[in-house]
Image: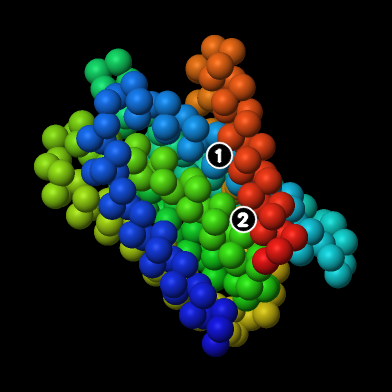
């Protein structure tokens, strides 16, 4: 029962993050870009740390790094690759403009909705393994959701949506995390293997997002100061996951 409560509270918090975009887009564009790139770097470190310090050690503790776990990790990587190809959706965290166009808003909402649904499944599975792993997974997802939701909100505004309409549809997309969590909890009640399968899948997803989407975004800004700041933010993200490992 405790795991279920933690799961629902976590996905509700994550869903509410979809509303942060309107506050950040009132900032100066250059200042906003710097904040977003710091958050992207922090997110990359948190996702790498979540995968290597929490998820994989947890699922390999009893039986080792089995072939099933390896295939589940690879499945997570392939899943997000396919989603990006089919829906033409890609994580991007720079506000949309004529010089930095994004795909059509409906495609962005569909892709983001699928991603949020999977986040819900992952969070449900992680809490069923243990509360500390669930908390670490939730924190990793939150650090990534903040810059992502700011970017998504910008896409909808650029596509011609009003601020109210953009917030509404972005929030609806975010609520699919709650749907995913509820389905994950229902599946797990009939299958004890669900959590052990979804966690390495989550690790693969975390590694794909951090390595394929976030790091390339940072390589576009290669000034010495930017590089140092991004590196330190990544280290901070990893350190945050380490602290959760030691004290959660």
Q: Are marks 2 and 1 in contact (CB under 8 Å)?
A: no
Residue reaching furthest to the bottom: 1
Residue tagged 2: 202
Which of the pair 65/11 is nearer the observer? 11
Residue reaching furthest to the top: 223
Instruction: Kindly identify the residue that appears in the image at 71 percent across and 52 percent down.
Output: 242
**Where residue 156 sits in the image (x, y, percent)?**
23, 39
Q: Residue 85: tell me if it is visible.
A: no
**Where residue 117 sits in the image (x, y, percent)?**
43, 60
Residue tagged 1: 42
Q: Quadrant of residue 149?
A: top left
Instruction: Kindly identify the residue that appears in the image at 33 percent across and 59 percent down.
Output: 16
Disc count in the image?
2
**Where residue 19 sits in the image (x, y, percent)?**
28, 52
Tell me the distance, in whole angstroms, between the alpha carbons under discs 2 and 1: 18 Å
Instruction: Kindly identify the residue that appears in the image at 59 percent across and 59 percent down.
Output: 137
State which quarter of the image contains the N terminus: bottom right
Question: How are the residues colored?
Answer: rainbow
- Judged by depth in the image, the label closer to the viewer, 2 or 1, is 1
State which quarter of the image contains the C terminus: bottom right
Lower sequence index among marks 2 and 1: 1
Mark 1 nearby-residue class (10 Å; few <14, some 14–19, many ≥20)? many
Q: Quadrant of residue 231?
A: top right
**Where residue 151 sits in the image (x, y, percent)?**
35, 37
Which of the pair 131/215 is nearer the observer? 131
Q: Which mark is residue 56?
A: none
**In screen coordinates, is 218 left or right of 171?**
right
Instruction: Kindly identify the residue that appears in the image at 27 percent across and 59 percent down.
Output: 172
């Amino acid at each position: 029962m405790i795991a279920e409560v933690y799961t629902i509270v976590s996905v509700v918090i994550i869903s509410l993050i979809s509303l942060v975009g309107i506050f950040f887009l009132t900032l100066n564009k250059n200042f906003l870009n710097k904040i977003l790139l710091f958050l992207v770097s922090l997110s990359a470190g948190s996702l790498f740390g979540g995968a290597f310090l929490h998820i994989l050690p947890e699922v390999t503790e009893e039986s080792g790094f089995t072939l099933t776990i390896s295939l589940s990790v690879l499945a997570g990587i392939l899943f997000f690759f396919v989603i990006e190809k089919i829906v033409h959706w890609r994580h991007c965290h720079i506000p949309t403009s004529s010089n930095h166009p994004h795909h059509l808003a409906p495609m962005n909402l569909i892709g983001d909705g699928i991603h949020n649904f999977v986040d819900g499944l992952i969070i449900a599975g992680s809490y069923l393994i243990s509360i500390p792993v669930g908390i670490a997974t939730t924190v990793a997802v939150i650090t990534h959701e903040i810059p992502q939701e700011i970017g998504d909100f910008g896409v909808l505004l650029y596509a011609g949506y009003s601020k109210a309409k953009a917030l509404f549809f972005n929030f609806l997309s975010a609520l699919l995390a709650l749907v995913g969590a509820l389905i994950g909890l229902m599946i797990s009640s009939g299958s004890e293997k669900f959590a052990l399968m979804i966690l390495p899948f989550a690790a693969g997803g975390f590694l794909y997002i951090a390595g394929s989407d976030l790091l390339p975004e940072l390589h576009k800004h290669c000034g010495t100061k930017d590089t140092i700041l991004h590196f330190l933010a990544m280290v901070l993200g990893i350190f945050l996951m380490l602290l959760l490992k030691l004290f959660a």
